[in-house]
Image (tube, grey):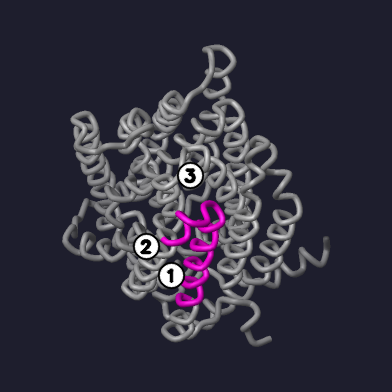
Amino acid sequence: MRSVTNLYYKLKSNERIVLLGTMWATLIRASGMGITYLSLILLARWMGAEQFGIYSYIFSVISILAIIPLFGLSYSSIPLIAEYEVEKAFSKLRGLLLFGTGFVVTISIIISFILALAIKMDFILLGKYRDAFLIGCATLPVFSLLLYLSEASRGLGRAIAAFAPLQVLVPLVFLLLSFISFYFFGGLESTRAIWLWFFSMLILVIPQLLYLFRIVIKHFSGASRSYNIRHWLRLSAHFFLISITVVLLFQMDVLILGIFHEPEIVGYYSAAARTALLVTIVLQAINALGARQYATLYKMNQIYDLQQLLHSLSRWLVWATAGTAIFLLLIGYNLLAFFGTNFTQAYPALAILTLAHATTVILGPVTVLLNVTGNQKVAAKVLTIAAIAGLILNSILIPKYGIVGAAIATGIMHIYWALSMHWHVRKILKVETCLFFMKS
């Protein structure tokens, strides 16, 4: 214990900030992922494979559509907030937060209305997914706003406000409502589950919105509002492509699997895919808190300090990821059995995805580094190529090999973009993110 304490006090202030923030973010995310994972297990058992598959498919679709109203503002807010704080341009910071909130709400409502109308008039034929998709349209504005508020809070350095609502409280409220529905109101099907998901987010989005406005009023009350909308949207456009492709990288397999196979198969694979994502929890936490520090250090041209920060974080990243990956490979079959007996057929996919995600995580926070240092065009190009490759691979492998084909295609796609991003980070930023390539 003393050696760990001594190691902590040897770290520089930036490293301590990110390390402490990462610990908090990891704790919050671990709690959230635990609640979410428990929810998935119980939903699968309460709804059955087919209804669970429909719910999983709609969740993937809405996760992609919810990114559109953000238009990259959630990503661009992080480097912009860091820039405005360094330059003490608080009027621009206040204007950015107020504009972003209004923009996301307006665009998401318009998209939701158009989609619902198209489904009602049967312009979009969805088969078994129709009713659930129609309800999913109602969730779109709330989900988009929650995503934006979380990223804005992250940019302001509020770790708990950034992650607790969406990562912990929404899954917890959703789990409680689902429990009540199943045991007291005669069951739980996919349409009701999506309604409960909507109400869970609605309950929490209002207090989070009020909290963000409270921060703006308390800390920037003396500043006027300054709007540089053209600059914000032009910068965000590059991040928009990145955000869409990132979500596609994680949801494309489920979408294509749902086209070629029945909802039950989608349910089996979704359980394996969500389980394999547990290996990325530490990197997600590091990215969440580190992004702000990366942007600030790079803006101040403190490249040596940035490299030292990455070196410190990479040690924690490698060991935590290795331990989690081994754990999932050893007991993954048993974890899938909790979803239901037939879910264990997805274990080969779980093993493939776990190894692929572990590889990308060990390479470090490469995507975030490029995004927050003004190299989002490079990141967008890499992710676009990866998404196109993933679309081709999934379309070829899923019809023939099903669940395993989806895992292979997704694994190849993820490893490609991580390796490519790593190469660009070394070339452009002159820093190393992977512990195994760092000089001692």
| Residue 116 locus on image (x, y percent) | 24, 33
Residue that carries the numbered disc 3 in the rendered image: 161
Q: Is residue 138 above or below residue 7?
A: above
The residues bearing labels 2 and 3 have C-alpha atoms spaced at a distance of 19 Å
Say if the magenta span includes residue 281. Answer: no
**Badge 1 amino acid:** Thr
Residues at circles 2 and 1 in contact by the CB criterion of under 8 Å: yes
Boundaries of the magenta span = 396-421
N-term-proximal mark, 2 vs 3: 2
Q: Residue furthest front?
A: 400
The residue lying at 35 percent from left, 66 percent from top is: 388
N-term-proximal mark, 1 vs 3: 3
Relative to 268, 292 lies left or right: left
Which SS class for mark 3?
helix
The residues bearing labels 1 and 3 have C-alpha atoms spaced at a distance of 21 Å
| Residue 43 locus on image (x, y percent) | 56, 31
The C terminus: image quadrant:
bottom right
Quarter holding residue 93: bottom left
Quarter holding residue 11: bottom right
The residue lying at 52 percent from left, 23 percent from top is: 177
Residue that carries the numbered disc 1 in the rendered image: 296
Which SS class for mark 2?
helix
Of tags 2 and 3, the one toward the viewer is 3
Asked whether residue 88 is in view, the answer is no
Q: Is residue 49 above or below residue 439?
A: above
| Residue 160 locus on image (x, y percent) | 53, 46
Which secondary structure is most common in the magenta stretch?
A: helix
Residue that carries the numbered disc 2 in the rendered image: 85
* Tag of residue 431: none
